[in-house]
Image (cartoon, rainbow, N blue to C red):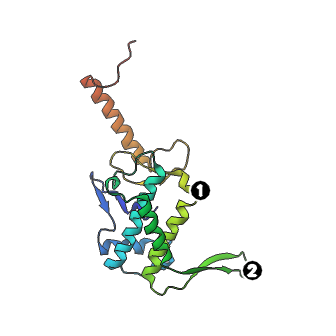
């Protein structure tokens, strides 16, 4: 979700891409505390392209998940095909050879980790992002994935309760205000729903 959310509303009616530049990509990598392979990496153009490629595949597959509802309007017009997205995601995940390892201290519970045969931290990072996407898209949370369709919002989100329609309360407020505006404007111009007689 963090990777998909690097395309977001800029607060002024437009869309911003946090990965548009090498500097922005470096900033995003350094903010990702959950990615052990990211520790202290500085992006270059090749790494930025790899991460953006995985994000494009993820967002295309997110659009497939939320279908037949419309995808995020941020990139709906440039989404790659589902087949291309699958190929790109799987190829990125396969770039790092990993083996599961079991750690089990004398006092405590067992824990699994992945042991990598890859020396390049850039390859490890892109592969880890792809594996995280594979885990999400093949897991149970996928069924709760939605595109937020509040005015100006371009995010995907995980629906946390049955009636949730928007990614955040502020998006819900914007959507309700927009609906109210449309109703009152339509009533004033005679284009709104028919008024009920008392």
Name the spot of residue 190 as percent of width and height, x first: 26, 22
Task: Return the residue at label 2.
Answer: 107
Q: Is residue 39 visible?
A: no
Question: How many neighbours does mark 1 have within 10 angstroms: few (below 14), some (14-19), or many (20 or more)?
Answer: few
Task: Give the residue displayed 30% in from the left and 54% down from the top.
Answer: 11
Q: Out of 61 and 19, give the one closest to the viewer.
A: 61
In the image, taking residue 1 as reference, residue 98 lies left or right, namely: right
Task: Give the residue displayed 43% in from the left and 68% down from the top.
Answer: 88
For label 1, the SS is helix
On residue 2, the disc is none
For label 2, the SS is loop
Task: Give the residue displayed 67% in from the left and 75% down from the top.
Answer: 111
Task: Return the residue at label 1.
Answer: 140
Name the spot of residue 70 as percent of width and height, x first: 40, 46
Q: Is residue 76 visible?
A: yes
Sequence order check, earlier mark of 2 and 1: 2
Q: Out of 173 and 187, give the one closest to the viewer.
A: 187
């Amino acid at each position: 979700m963090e990777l998909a959310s690097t395309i977001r509303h800029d607060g002024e009616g437009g869309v911003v891409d946090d990965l548009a530049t090498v500097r922005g990509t470096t900033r995003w990598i350094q903010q990702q505390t959950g990615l052990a392979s990211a520790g202290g990496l500085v992006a270059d153009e090749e790494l930025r392209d790899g991460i953006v490629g995985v994000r494009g595949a993820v967002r295309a597959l997110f659009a497939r998940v939320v279908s037949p509802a419309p995808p995020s309007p941020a990139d709906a017009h440039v989404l790659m095909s589902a087949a291309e997205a699958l190929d790109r995601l799987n190829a990125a995940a396969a770039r790092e050879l990993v083996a599961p390892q079991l750690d089990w201290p004398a006092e405590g519970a067992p824990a699994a980790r992945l042991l990598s045969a890859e020396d390049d931290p850039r390859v490890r990072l892109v592969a880890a992002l792809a594996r995280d996407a594979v885990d999400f898209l093949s897991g149970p949370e996928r069924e709760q994935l939605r595109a937020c369709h509040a005015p100006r919002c371009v995010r995907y989100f995980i629906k946390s309760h049955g009636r949730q329609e928007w990614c955040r309360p502020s998006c819900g407020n914007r959507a309700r205000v927009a609906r109210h505006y449309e109703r009152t404007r339509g009533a004033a111009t005679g284009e709104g729903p028919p008024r009920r007689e008392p």
